[in-house]
Every structure is written in structure tokens, then in C-alpha cells.
Image (tube, rainbow, N blue to C red):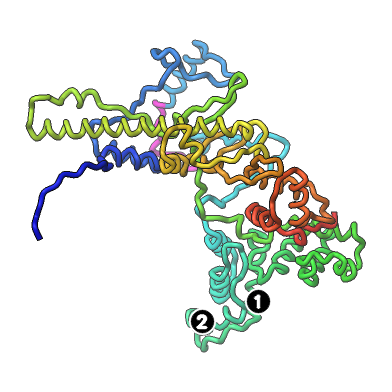
Amino acid sequence: MKQTLSLKLGQTLTMTPQLQQAIRLLQLSTLDLQQEIQQTLESNPMLEFDEEEPTPDGNEIPEPAAEANSEPQTDDTESDLSETMAVTDNESIPEDLPVDTSWDDIYQPAAVAAPQGEDQDWSFDRNSIGESLQDHLLWQLNLTPMSQTDYLIATAIIDAIDSDGMLTVTIEDITESLNTDGAGEVEEPDTDQPLIEIDEVVAVLKRIQQFDPVGIAARDLGECLALQLRALAEDTPWRKEAIALVIEHLDLLAARNFNALKRSTRLEEADLASVVALIQSLNPRPGSSITSEVPEYIVPDVVVFKDNGRWVVELNSEATPRIKINETYASLVKRADSSAQNTYLKDNLQEARWFLKSLQSRHETLLKVATRIVEHQRGFLEYGEEAMKPLVLHDIAEAVEMHESTISRVTSRKYIHTPKGIFELKYFFSSHVSTNTGGEVSSTAIRALIRKLTADENPRKPLSDNKIAAILAEQNIKVARRTVAKYRESLAIPPSNERKRLI
């Protein structure tokens, strides 16, 4: 084959390091961006925190505001305070205290103020964030006097409790595991170790079921609800009837078969409604009140508020730390010097400028996209979800003259604070459903309508999916029954047979 040379003309997109950095910063969330900035500050000496707070006039920083109801100190107060400090500094602990003298006679402890108000009952809640349910139960177990065998059984029971507070294994399984693994650790001097009986495990289980939270270590839902009902005061209305119902007829209550319940319990409809209301006030998952998960707080990237009748969109200045170039180090860079030290400073200065430019580009793009979204969804800010308009990425991309992929990066994991709450920017994008009049309705608005219809329905005769579709059709919204079912399930709304109530 003969080799030849030829010229071709074409266009290619080259991803420079600066462009790659800008794209990467654009798709970072607020938390990830803060970590990225911190790492850059640690690696680049040319960057530093900008600790100067912006002020209205740009020159003076206002003094900290004084607390309400505070009075200025007088000269007498200052002199008394200085004398007190002097006395305190000159005091020293005596080397030898008299035998009949106590520590409190010389050094009075600081008084602890009691809670204000009529209710003086102090509540010490030891449950803190990060404590698991097993830790909470073991803490109570260590405060409960019992034999070593019972302690071994209780530990096995606690290990078998799931995060909802339910016992996940049978009593027989626990007994068998203890007799094969842990029974040899029980101290029984001069005798052989006897096997643990099922009755012993049941007895220890009854003691654990008295622990906090109420209803813990139940073997099924009926027992969990019964434990919580027995913990109520004996004079609680309908307590006895509720206990009998959850033990004997819980399956009928789960199926919403109220006619069979009235026949089985021999209660009138109003009385049965009171019993069911008492049961519904209980917690079917008592272990969920003790969680080891640390809550994650959302810091909004954008804030929108109404000022003089117009909606204003601003970036949240507290979302990202303010950084700047260190002028002292930047002044050390010499243009004509090619030494290793000067080259190092030049490279870091150039990287710092690129980083600041990428941050600025990110902020401008985010503000531009958020402003367009607010302009398009002004009805949502005024009237709520029912006024949400259909919106796709292509609409915003055309408005800001950017690619859809850029809009997707900007709106992912970015949050906006509105008078209606904090939402992800992705929340404002939704598909549309055609109307009989030729218009379009957002799927978010349809979900809001379904939620409103089910909230206002007659609890005796809840609306079926077909009925909801018919009501929406009367409002010129063409939605199929299966679409209503899909939206209803996405809202965690149960079907009509499970929403039926007595009252």
C-alpha cells in the first residue's frame, strides 16, 4: 500500500483542565463544594479565607447588637465587679481544713436555676443522637438486677430485636442457641450446668418488655399494641376493649371489616370508632423512636423572597466560604525569575485564579438558572403545588442559552429556599398531561389535586381510582385510572379499601 499525505479540516472540542475543573465544580453539592474548597486551601498557599464581612457602606463593620432588656453597666457596677474579681484571684485553698469544716462551708457551689413555669418536673433524656436501640436497651439492662443466667438470656433477646423494636426470632430458637453456645458460661459451682428452659426465656422476655420504649421486644404486632395499651392508666376509656381487639381481632381491623368487628366485639359503631381511635394513637414501630442515624441538614444554595411585590432570587452567601488570593504571597512572584521557587509560586497563583474563576462561573450559572425557574414557576410560589406548570430541561436550556447537560448538572443536588419550603431545583421540573381544552397540566399539580381529593373525601366511602380519574376529567384533565394509581402510590396514599374509616 502506498503511503500519502493529505490535509483535513475539522472541528473538535478539547477539554482543557480549566474547563474540566469548571464542570466538576458545577455539579458538586454544597457540602462537596465546601470540602473541595477546604482541600484547595490546604494545597494552594496562594488562597486564603476572606474574613472581612461585607457591610452596607463598605467601610465600617457594625458593632454587635445588645441583648434585649439589657442595661448599661454603671461605674459602681464596674467597680464592684473589679473588687469581686480581685478577691476571687487572691483567694487560695487553705492547706489544712478543720475537721468539722466541709468544703461547702468555704466554697459555695454555683446555684442551678430551676426550670421556669408551673411544671417543675425535670426530664433527663439520655437518648442522644448516635445511640442505637440495642445500646439503649443494654443501658437499661445493666441497671436491672438479675442473675447471671437471666442476664445472658436478656442479652440474647436484645440482640434479636430489629430497628423497629420487634423480636425477629422465636423463643425456641433463642433457647436452643443458649443451650448450645452460651450455657457453659453460667456459674453453677459443684453441679453440672442445667439446660435453660423455655419458661425462663419467656420470663426474661416479659421483663425486657417493660423497658423503654413501651412495646419493645414484642413477637407480633398484636402483642406490641397490647403492651402499649397495658401501660396506659387503668381508667383510660376503652382500654380494656382495645386490648381484647388487638389480641383477638387484629386481622379484621387490618382488613377494615368493621361490620365483622361490630359483630365480634358487640360494640356499637360509635363505641367501636372510639376503640379504633385509641389503637391508632399507638406506635406500631416503637423502636423507631431510638435512632443512631445523625440527621443531615440541608443548606440551600439559593434563596427566593418577595420584596415590594416582586420575587427576588439571591445566592446564599453562607452556603460557601468566601476565599481570595493572598496578596502577600502574590507579591513575591517575579516575572523574569525562572527559579524553582518562583515557578512554584507562579503555578499556584495561576491555579488559584482558575479556581476563583470557576467558582464565579458556577455562582453565575446557578443564579441564572434559578432565576429562570422562579420566573416560570411564579404560580407555585403564589398559590402552591396546584399551580405548578410543566417544565423540562430543554425549556430552561433555551432560556439561558446553555446545553441541557449543563442545566442537569446545575439543578442536581442544589436546593432553593422558598416561602413554601426548601426544594431541590429538580423538583420544579415535571412532565405534562394534556387537557381537553388543548392546554397542559404539570404532573406535580395532578399529584397535588389527588392529595387534596383524598384528604377531603368521605372516610366512610373513600374515592376509588376510577372516581378520582372521573373528577379530574370534569376539570378537563385527561388522566387514566392506572396513571392515578401510579401518582397515588408515589404519594404513599393507600388504596380506597385501606382508607375506609368509621368516622
Mark 1–mark 2 Cα distance, whole angstroms, equals 16 Å
Q: Can residue 103 be seen in this view?
A: no
Name the residue beneath numbered marker 2.
Answer: 183
Q: Looking at the image, which is closer to me, 395 or 487?
A: 395
Q: What stretch is highlighted in magenta?
A: 89-101
State which quadrant residue 406 falls in: top left
In the rendered structure, the answer to whether residue 474 lies left or right of residue 352 reads right
Quadrant in the picture for the C terminus: bottom right
Name the residue beneath numbered marker 1.
Answer: 202
Q: Position of residue 108 (x, y in %)?
A: 52, 34
Q: Where is residue 338 in the image (x, y as percent from the top left)?
A: 7, 31
Q: Looking at the image, which is closer to me, 312 or 77?
A: 312
Frontmost of labels 1 and 2 is 1
Relative to 263, residue 342 above or below: above
Sort mark 2 into few (<14), some (14-19) or many (20+) by Cα contacts within 10 Å: some
Give the main secondary structure of the magenta stretch: loop
Q: Position of residue 349 (x, y in %)?
A: 21, 30
Quadrant in the picture for the N terminus: bottom left
Three-letter code for the amino acid on which mark 1 is drawn: Val
In the rendered structure, the answer to whether residue 227 lies left or right of residue 419 reads right
The residue located at (76%, 58%) in the rendering is: 496
Q: Does the magenta stretch include residue 154?
A: no
